[in-house]
Amino acid sequence: MTRSETSEQPPAPPPLAIKELSERCMGSADVAMLVLNMLEKQLRGDMPEIERLVAAQDAALVAKAAHALKGAAGAAAAPALHDLAAKIEMMAKGNQLALLSEIMVRLRAEVERCIGYLPAARESLRGCAGGEPLPKEQRP
């Protein structure tokens, strides 16, 4: 095995598990779109707020905001985002805000990755309107 073969990593999975999201929404593309829209709104609002609260060293509010983000990520089938938000919530509850710098960088990157993936996620769901389930050929 050459050096390049060992250093190459498989591509990261998409930040949102569209098939899982569709299953959680009972196959309704409309409901899944609503979940994605709510996630986007929360990502755009919560990330700056969490950063502000971390800078202000408000552990209780960081934990609360991270908990809300964790819930939204769970509902939208965004496992990496969910895990990072859970870790931030746990650390904030333990008043370990000084240790959050690295994880905040990772959270920011995952939020941006999720936001960047939303158009593709919506496109995957777009073929189904009126609450119809995704056709099998469109299911991820």
Image (tube, grey):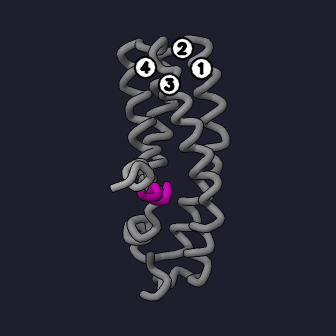
Q: Is residue 28 above or below residue 94?
A: below
User: Can residue 75 be seen at all in this image of the molecule?
Assistant: no
Write the residue at 56% across / 83% down: 128
Tell me whether circle 4 and circle 3 mark residues in contact (CB < 8 Å): no
Q: Nearer the viewer, mark 4 or mark 3?
A: 3
Q: Which residues are magenta?
A: 10-15
Decide: few, some or many residues near mark 4? Use Cα within 10 Å; few <14, some 14-19, many ≥20.
many
Q: Nearer the viewer, mark 3 or mark 1?
A: 3
- The residue type indicated by label 4 comes to Ala
Separation of residues labelled 2 and 4 (CA atoms):
8 Å
**Circle on res. 14:** none
Write the residue at 66% across / 31% down: 48
The answer to whether residue 49 is left or right of residue 32 is right
Work out which quarter of the rendered image holds the C terminus and state it.
bottom left
- The residue type indicated by label 3 comes to Glu
- The residue type indicated by label 1 comes to Leu
Separation of residues labelled 4 and 1 (CA atoms):
10 Å
Write the residue at 43% across / 36% down: 84
Tell me whether circle 2 and circle 3 mark residues in contact (CB < 8 Å): no
**Circle on res. 53:** 1
Tell me whether circle 3 and circle 1 mark residues in contact (CB < 8 Å): no
Decide: few, some or many residues near mark 2? Use Cα within 10 Å; few <14, some 14-19, many ≥20.
some
Tell me whether circle 1 and circle 2 mark residues in contact (CB < 8 Å): yes
The residue indicated by pointer 4 is 92
The residue indicated by pointer 2 is 58
Q: Earlier in the sequence, mark 3 or mark 1?
A: 1
Decide: few, some or many residues near mark 1? Use Cα within 10 Å; few <14, some 14-19, many ≥20.
some
Separation of residues labelled 3 and 1 (CA atoms):
16 Å
Q: Nearer the viewer, mark 2 or mark 3?
A: 3
